[in-house]
């Protein structure tokens, strides 16, 4: 019997994993890491309900760690099949999985040094070598053309407009002469945004698994240019620094684009800008090279040849730890962009420890902050931030700028779903916290009159029934 089982990203926005079974074969759609609260992170250490060696293939919607970050663990635990992804996703994973493993090794070493791990010595979830073993299993598939994995599974990707290489997957499942089309939305992006194409509509599906990250709200309609210009000019006037936790993939490039445009328009001063993320620096090079994902507006700007649209005038790319530490000596206005975007690890933690106690500074939260993350705690008004075992007073201004989200909001998700020419047999809402998913179910039922289910962890359904 064919079956789809929800192994992650239900009741939460991380850990995306969907197991598709047909004809005795198993295909895993996405293989993400759980992030956020202690309870969610613990799931990464729990055994999957099926042996990893019983999975035949993995196919990826995009490279973000909450969709790919469990791959090294899966391979270490026995998976030995191919991992399918388009070229941009493959290249991004080459950076992100190695970086994720490196950060976990670093965090484990630091936890051992500080003595705040229950393991002695503290253990990483996986190592850099595990990540390399996973990357060796990647095989590239077409960006938009159909691709047959086996007699049971054919995949047709569509541009999701979320990050470079992001796709929604239209998977035809076949067993005993019966077929069904199931669409996995991946993360649906924004419309009319800088750099990337709009999400591509899909006409046909028997079942749809749709993300609901922002299913309970619409993003502000105010201009992100105005929001950033206001913050920069206000903070510069009081002599502060602008610190931005930013995802290395997508968010950093969008921010740099906005800063450059504001500089060109003379709406903000030309400040020293530190991109303190080796991975973000490498990712920017990939964004420039993979022109197949560029919007018409961005392509036209590139073709003018007047300036580099993804760099400010006074940009400093800090690759080494020594260069990163030198930023601590900056006491005049500047911009610091560093990962991770939810403040769950990476160099941003050191900058926050250094800059949070100063009320002149601002921390700009320019993306989704999952439950249990330090970013969410700052957003909700925490007076102290626990960083590497120390309690850091939060006196800096905390400013959310949600216009930069790479996830479609409630209206944009409805717009994407409205591209289907007929209602599905069932819409499953995934990749959303409970309140967002519940709210979006009501919106879909009101506007589209579709049947909607919010699945639970390890729930299953038969796509051929």
Image (cartoon, rainbow, N blue to C red):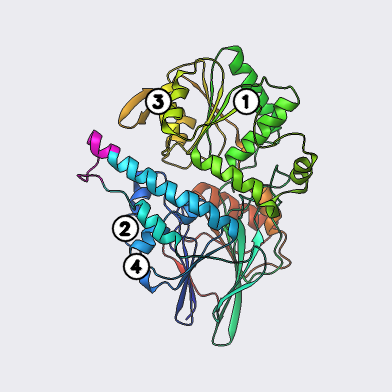
Which element is circle 1 on?
A: loop
Relative height, residue 337 to residue 414 (above, below): above
**Quarter of the view holding residue 445:** bottom right
Mark 2 or mark 3: whose residue is earlier in sequence: 2
Mark 3 or mark 1: whose residue is earlier in sequence: 1
Distance between the Cα atoms at labels 2 and 3? 32 Å
- The residue at the far top in this view is 238
Mark 4 or mark 1: whose residue is earlier in sequence: 4
**Magenta part of the chain:** 110-122
Whether the magenta-drawn stretch holds residue 111 is answered as yes
Q: Which residue is mark 4?
A: 78
Q: Between residue 263 and residue 3, name the one nearer to us.
A: 263
Q: Which residue is mark 2?
A: 46
Q: Which residue is mark 1?
A: 314
Give left or right: position of 45 versus 348: left
Relative height, residue 3 to residue 212 (above, below): below
Distance between the Cα atoms at labels 4 and 2? 15 Å
Q: Which mark is residue 353?
A: 3
Q: Do callouts 2 and 3 mark residues in contact (Cβ within 8 Å)? A: no
Give left or right: position of 171 versus 462: right
**Res 409 visible:** no
Residue mark closest to the camera, 4 vs 1: 1
Q: Position of residue 1 (x, y in %)?
A: 47, 81
Mark 1 or mark 2: whose residue is earlier in sequence: 2
Mark 4 or mark 2: whose residue is earlier in sequence: 2
């Amino acid at each position: 019997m064919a079956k789809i089982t929800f192994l992650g990203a239900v009741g939460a926005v991380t850990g995306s994993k969907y197991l598709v079974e047909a004809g005795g074969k198993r295909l895993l759609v996405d293989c993400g890491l759980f992030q956020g609260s202690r309870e969610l992170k613990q799931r990464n250490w729990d055994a999957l309900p099926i042996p990893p060696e019983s999975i035949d293939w993995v196919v990826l919607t995009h490279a973000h760690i909450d969709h790919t970050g469990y791959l090294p663990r899966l391979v270490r635990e026995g998976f030995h099949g191919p991992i399918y992804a388009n070229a941009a996703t493959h290249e991004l994973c080459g950076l992100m999985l190695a970086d994720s493993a490196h950060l976990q090794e670093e965090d484990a070493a630091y936890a051992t040094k500080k003595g705040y791990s229950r393991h002695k010595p503290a253990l990483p979830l996986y190592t850099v070598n595990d990540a390399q073993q996973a990357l060796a299993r990647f095989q590239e598939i077409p960006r938009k053309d159909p691709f047959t994995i086996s007699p049971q599974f054919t995949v047709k990707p569509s541009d999701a407009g979320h990050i470079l290489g992001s796709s929604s997957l239209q998977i035809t499942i076949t067993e005993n002469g019966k077929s069904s089309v199931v669409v996995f939305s991946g993360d649906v992006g924004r419309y009319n945004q800088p750099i990337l194409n709009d999400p591509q509509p899909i006409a046909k599906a028997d079942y749809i698994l749709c993300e609901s990250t922002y299913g309970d709200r619409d993003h502000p309609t105010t201009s992100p240019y105005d929001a950033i210009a206001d913050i920069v000019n206000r903070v510069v006037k009081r002599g502060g620094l602008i610190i931005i936790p930013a995802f290395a993939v997508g968010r950093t490039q969008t921010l740099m684009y906005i800063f450059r445009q504001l500089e060109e328009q003379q709406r903000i001063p030309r400040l020293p800008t530190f991109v303190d993320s080796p991975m973000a620096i490498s990712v920017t090079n990939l964004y420039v090279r993979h022109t197949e994902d560029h919007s018409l507006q961005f392509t036209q700007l590139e073709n003018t040849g007047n300036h580099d649209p993804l760099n400010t005038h006074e940009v400093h790319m800090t690759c080494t730890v020594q260069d990163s530490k030198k930023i601590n000596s900056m006491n005049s206005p500047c911009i610091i962009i560093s990962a991770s975007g939810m403040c769950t690890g990476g160099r941003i933690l050191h900058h926050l420890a250094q800059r949070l106690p100063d009320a002149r500074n601002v921390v700009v939260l320019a993306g989704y902050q999952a439950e249990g993350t330090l970013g969410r705690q700052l957003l909700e008004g925490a007076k102290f931030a626990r960083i590497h075992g120390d309690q850091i007073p939060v006196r800096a201004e905390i400013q959310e700028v949600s216009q930069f989200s790479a996830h479609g909001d409630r209206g944009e998700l409805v717009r994407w779903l409205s591209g289907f020419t007929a209602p599905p047999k069932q819409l499953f809402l995934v990749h959303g916290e409970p309140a967002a998913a519940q709210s979006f179910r009501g919106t879909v039922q009101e506007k589209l009159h579709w049947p909607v289910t919010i699945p639970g962890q390890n729930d299953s359904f038969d796509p051929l029934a």
